[in-house]
């Protein structure tokens, strides 16, 4: 008779996200994962596969959770510029989480070395650019964003700035500097 799992998969996967996010892939050992996730090594292998497979599942779950957060924010029916600002502000605040963005951190650490990570990160970036483009288009249709900006080009610019801020928060504690960068970036929408 098969033994039932003694843990909730998403709960332990969320723990793996936190550990990989804080330490990075290379610095996280299987023993670190066993201790932090609070489950047996065999259970990790049986449920998720090896360390890389667990990492990919953690990265996919993180990306899904971030997409859901963005969708929730967009569904608030706030003005478009406020929605875009909130996306940037959430990066600067980042309360209760490891510093930076797990997705960006993973792309920086492994993007050149691991095609699977590079592909997942790139696909996520493309979806975010599309979301930003659609927000800019909607803002233009509502008269909230100036009409003479190219939504495609602006979405690339905003994405680049957002990734930059998600990287910079790892090296500076100067909140005013981060806010100034955000304000300058968002000024292209006025």
Image (cartoon, rainbow, N blue to C red):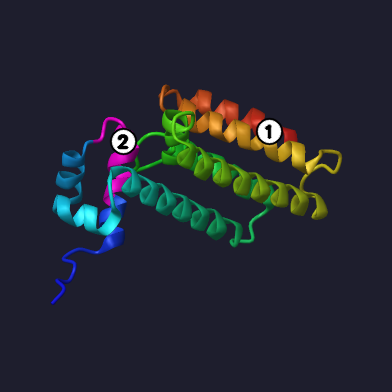
95 lies left or right of 108:
left
Q: Quadrant of the N terminus?
A: bottom left
Q: Position of residue 8 (x, y in %)?
A: 24, 64
Q: Can residue 190 be seen in this view?
A: no
Q: Residue furthest right?
A: 148
Q: Can residue 131 be seen in this view?
A: yes
How much space separates mark 1 and mark 2, taking CA atoms?
A: 28 Å
Q: Residue furthest bottom?
A: 1
| 104 shown above or below 130 | above
Residue 128: say if magenta. no
Would you call the spot at circle 2 few (<14 residues within 10 Å), some (14-19), or many (20 or more)? Answer: some
Query: Residue shown at 68%/51% (left/top)?
Result: 80
Q: Position of residue 170 (x, y in %)?
A: 41, 27
Query: Residue shown at 81%/39% (left/top)?
Result: 150
Which residue position is annotated with label 2? 22
Which residue position is annotated with label 1? 157
Main SS, magenta residues: helix
Query: Residue shown at 70%/40% (left/top)?
Result: 155
Question: Which mark identifies residue 100?
Answer: none
Task: Report the magenta residues as a range.
Answer: 15-28
Q: Position of residue 33 (x, y in %)?
A: 21, 44
Q: Nearer the viewer, residue 20 or 90?
A: 20
Q: Kindly state the secondary structure of the residue where label 1 is placed.
A: helix
129 lies left or right of 42:
right
Q: Nearer the viewer, residue 152 or 119?
A: 119
Q: Do the residues labelled 1 and 2 touch (CB within 8 Å)?
A: no
Mark 1 or mark 2, which has the lower sequence index?
A: 2
Q: Position of residue 107 (x, y in %)?
A: 47, 34
How many numbered discs, if any?
2
């Amino acid at each position: 008779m098969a033994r039932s799992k003694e843990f909730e998969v998403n709960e332990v996967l969320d723990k793996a996200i936190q550990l990989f996010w804080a330490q990075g892939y290379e610095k996280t050992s299987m023993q670190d994962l066993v201790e932090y996730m609070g489950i047996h090594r065999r259970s990790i292998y049986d449920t998720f596969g090896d360390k890389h497979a667990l990492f990919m599942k953690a990265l996919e779950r993180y990306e899904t959770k971030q997409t859901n957060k963005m969708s929730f924010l967009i569904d608030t029916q706030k003005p478009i510029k406020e929605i875009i600002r909130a996306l940037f502000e959430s990066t600067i605040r980042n309360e209760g989480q490891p510093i930076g963005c797990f997705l960006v951190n993973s792309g920086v650490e492994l993007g050149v070395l691991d095609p699977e990570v590079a592909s997942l990160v790139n696909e996520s970036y493309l979806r975010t650019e599309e979301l930003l483009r659609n927000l800019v288009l909607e803002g233009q249709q509502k008269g909230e964003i100036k009409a003479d900006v190219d939504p495609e080009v602006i979405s690339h610019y905003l994405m680049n700035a957002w990734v930059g801020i998600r990287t910079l928060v790892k090296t500076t504690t100067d909140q005013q500097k981060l806010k100034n960068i955000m304000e300058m970036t968002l000024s292209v929408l006025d």
